[in-house]
Structures are given as C-alpha cells and as structure tokens.
Amino acid sequence: MTLHEAKGGREFPKHFDGARFYNPNFAEAPGLLGVLRWKMTSRAEKSPRFISDVKTSIPPQQVAEGELRATVVNHSTVLIQERTSHILTDPIWSKRSSPFSWIGPARRRSPGVEQADIPRVDVVLISHNHVDHLDLPTLRWLATRGDTRFVVPVGVSALLRSQRIGPVDELDWGQSVQMDSATIHSVPAFHFSARGPFDRNKTLWCGYVIEYKDHRIYFAGDTGFGEHFAWIRERFGSPSLSLLPIGAYLPKRIMSPIHMGPAEAIKAHEILCSEASIAIHHGTFQLADDGIDTPKRELMAASKPESFLILENGQSFGVQR
C-alpha cells in the first residue's frame, strides 16, 4: 500500500492549530453549553420505537467487469462493490448508536443486509470517531474476518489499534492511499470529533473520494453544507456516485454547522454535478429533533432531481460502464 499527497487541483486549507482540528472559514459545532440549552428547550419529533418494514437482501459475491453496485445497509453504512474490490463505509450493526449496550439512541430499523450475508470486505472507510460512524463491536467483527484494511482520518488509528483492529491507514485531507484497483483520497468535511468530554476535535473528520478505472465515488461522511463540495469537484471532477447525508438536521441553529438538511444535500448534489447520489444518514437512528422519516419526506417534498435516490435499507443501485 502506498500513501501519497493528491496532486493537482486546489490545495485544501489549513485545518489544524497545533492542538486541535477545526473547520476552516466555517462555523464550529456548538459546545457543551449550546447542546445543554438545546436539550432543555427543544422537543424532538415523535417517531415509532421500531419500524418493521425492512426487506433484507443478499449482495452478490462479485459484480461484473465495469459494474459498480452500492447497497445501503443502514444509516451511513453502504457496501460499494466493483469487480476487484469491495468497500464498506462507516459500518454499524449494533442495536444502539452508543458506547454502551444499555443506553443511548436505539435502532429504529433493522439493517438491510445481515452480517452473515456481507461478502468479503477489502477496505473499511471511517469518516470520523462519533459512535454512529465508528462502532467498535462492528469493527472488531470485521477485523476477525481478516483481509480487511481500515482507512481513518488523522488521530483515529490509535483507537483501532488499541482494540486490535487493523491494519490501519491514517489520512489527512489531501492524502491518498492505493488499494489494489482503487485509489482512496481523504477530502474535507465540515464537522467535529469527540468520543468523550475531553477529546473534542483531537482527531480529524473527513469524506472520501474513491477512484476506480471506470468510476469515481464520493462518500461525504458527516458534514455541514459548504464550499468544500466545489473544492472536491474542482480537484477530482464530477462523481459517478455520491453518498450524501440528509438527517439529524434539526434544530438548524444547532445542527447546520455539522449536518446538512435535505435541501442542502440537493444543492451539494448539483454543485458536485454528480451523475447520481444516494441519501444516507437517515432512517435508522434518531439522533436529533427531526423524526426518523422526516429527512426522507422533506427530500421528496423538495423537488429533488431524479438522479438523487432514496433507497431503503437493503436496496441497491448499479452503474454499468
């Protein structure tokens, strides 16, 4: 595996002050006091405790030459299959989005693919260290299967190695790693990091561009809406497929620096000139005031282009070159 700096296009701006990472020229996530005020003064939309409408699917063990297949598992977990490599984004199969099994946001829908039905996974992409994106029980399970590499933002590898999860490649914005037929580039996202009260922004957050011979995929991770979408298109060109988050966006005064809403995701899709986009980060865990299916309804009501897809857990989208 080779690690290198991406060449050409815009140089991404400074985002580290020597102690902590930050969002360049962008609003920072609210601090503890802001979150406490939100929790004390706001009321989340009511949603069913559990929705039994998922039809599970079994992805193929391998796809045809020139084919790209993306299967939504749940939340931000998508299985990307190309002939020579399989990539899994921010995998979570746990019953709660929490470091604890007994408290924290509970799963409202089942995964669309059972763990036993996941084919080989060559690469796992982790966008940042929040528990709904870095789920240690799921990562430990993937590590026991062997032959999987884990790609993480700067500072996150220590946590994985402490859990004997690896091998791990750690990337800063603008860095890339070659994985067989795919080149994986770390790109900016506007978000924050923390797994506890004392480690805020000690590790980086990012999105990823995956370059195959015939396809270019953009996985946004968690991000607010900003100028980084134009930076990414300028450097890498228009994606064949983008995975764009739409959920956990209310109340906007709290969430807009870190999460896009449906209307902003449509703008990102248009700025990227993505051939197709899939909505992620919705429908499985209720993490903010918007109801479990509010982001999906709002995206449909926002006159989204036909190329912006809403897939249910277990559904797939394929592109053939």
Image (tube, rainbow, N blue to C red):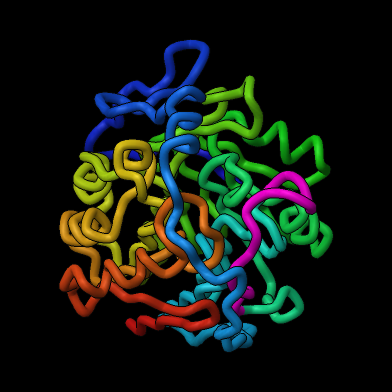
Quarter of the image for residue 230 reads top left
Residue extending furthest toward the top: 18
- Foreground pick, 118 / 68: 118
What residue is at 43 percent from the left and 62 percent from the top? 291
What residue is at 62 percent from the left and 54 percent from the top? 105
What residue is at 35 percent from the left and 45 percent from the top? 251
Does residue 259 show up magenta in the picture? no
Question: What range of the chain is rendered magenta?
Answer: 98-112
Residue 281, horizontal then vertical, whole percent: 46, 59
Q: Is residue 262 left or right of residue 109?
A: left
Vertical placement of residue 84 versus 142, above or below: below
What residue is at 52 percent from the left and 63 percent from the top? 75
Vertical placement of residue 93 versus 62, above or below: above
Name the main secondary structure of what is drawn in magenta.
loop
- Indicate the quadrant containing the C terminus: top left, top right, bottom left or bottom right: bottom left
Residue 223, horizontal then vertical, whole percent: 37, 45
- Foreground pick, 287 / 22: 287
- Foreground pick, 37 / 81: 37
Residue 14, horizontal then vertical, whole percent: 34, 21
Q: Is residue 101 left or right of residue 208?
A: right
Residue 211, horizontal then vertical, whole percent: 40, 59
Residue 219 visible in the displayed image? no
Vertical placement of residue 98 versus 13, above or below: below
Residue 236 visible in the displayed image? yes
